[in-house]
Image (cartoon, rainbow, N blue to C red):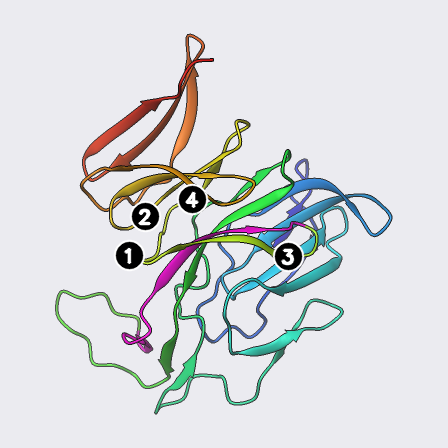
Amino acid sequence: MLALDPKTGKRKWYFQFTPHDTHDWDANETPMLVDLPFRGGVRKLLIQANRNAFYYVLDRETGQFLHGKAFAHQTWATGLDDQGHPIVKPGTDPTPDGVYICPDAQGATNFAAPSFDPRTGLFFVSVREACAVYSSRTREPVPGAGYTGTGQRLDEVVGAHGAVRALDPVSGDTRWNFPIQEGSSATGVLATSGGLVFAAVADGNLIALEAASGKLLWHYQTGEHIKSSPMSFAVDGTQYVAVSSGSVLFAFALPQP
């Protein structure tokens, strides 16, 4: 995470989530800026649910690590120290014979944007629960297939299940969890001021959850795997929620008061 002076481009501070990363957990997840009470006063915070399965709270003015904890299942670290550095377990780096680690290389979350609801004070994130065998052995290339040199082998028995998870933005504690059994979601979540959280499921359903509780309120089957994040906009005073699925753009009008 980098903070740059917008006038000069000079680096003001940086924070490295996974030093000596050997599992491809690059921190490409969307950070969020919030002003919240923290240990006695309102602070300017930067929060992020990271691909390595840990949730982080930083002071966005200084880059100081303030708090962190696991928000998904992980087996590679015993926790974070007081500087936010992971306390890595011995024997968790990839080997030629392979090492079983959670999460897998796609991470406990990825590029899917999270959302924050100031009314409930909750941070919503698309979560992926999966484990894999990481190997450092060079693989033979396969014509026509992507090649990464070494890589991982997903645990097909456990699979890759997902969830929409609501976290307390200060403590990182899970407030509610909506499991997604039909494959994990790789799309972002959308919170609205009306108390709803929209998300997509790999089986093609666009879903609406109650922001305060995670209760399923509505769903619509689009007929295709949804790979885009839902968005909201207004035209002539009417609010819409839209999402693309396959080659089709779906738009839904919310009920008028």
Which residue type does callout 1 highlight?
Glu
> Is 100 rendered above or below residue 112?
below
Please state which of residues 78 and 209 is positioned toward the viewer in this rendering.
Answer: 209
Identify which amino acid the numbered label 4 is placed on.
Answer: Gly
Residue named by callout 4: 188
**Neighbourhood count class around disc 1 (C-alpha, 10 Å): few under 14, some 14–19, many 20 upward:** few
What SS does tag 3 mark? Answer: loop
- List the residue tagged with mark 1: 182
Chain part drawn in magenta:
149-169
Q: Is residue 256 left or right of residue 83?
A: left
Residue that numbered label 3 is attached to: 172
Name the front one of labels 4 and 3.
3
Q: Earlier in the sequence, mark 3 or mark 2?
A: 3
| Mark 2 and mark 4: Cα distance apart in space | 10 Å
| Mark-to-mark CA distance, 3 and 1 | 26 Å
State how far apart marks 2 and 1 are (Cα). Answer: 7 Å
Which residue occupies 56% across, 62% down?
71
Picture coordinates of residue 108, whole percent (x, y): 46, 62
Residue furthest out toward the bottom: 97
Determine whether 6 is above or below 23 in the image.
Answer: above
Secondary structure beneath label 1 = loop
Residue 75 among magenta residues? no
Q: CA distance from mark 4 to mark 3?
A: 19 Å
| Corner quadrant of residue 121 | top right
Which label's residue is closer to the chain start, 4 or 1?
Answer: 1
| Helix, strand or loop under label 2 | loop
For the view shown, which residue lies furthest in the top direction? Answer: 236
Q: Residues within 10 Å of mark 2 (few under 14, many from 20)?
A: many
Q: Are marks 3 and 2 in contact (CB under 8 Å)?
A: no
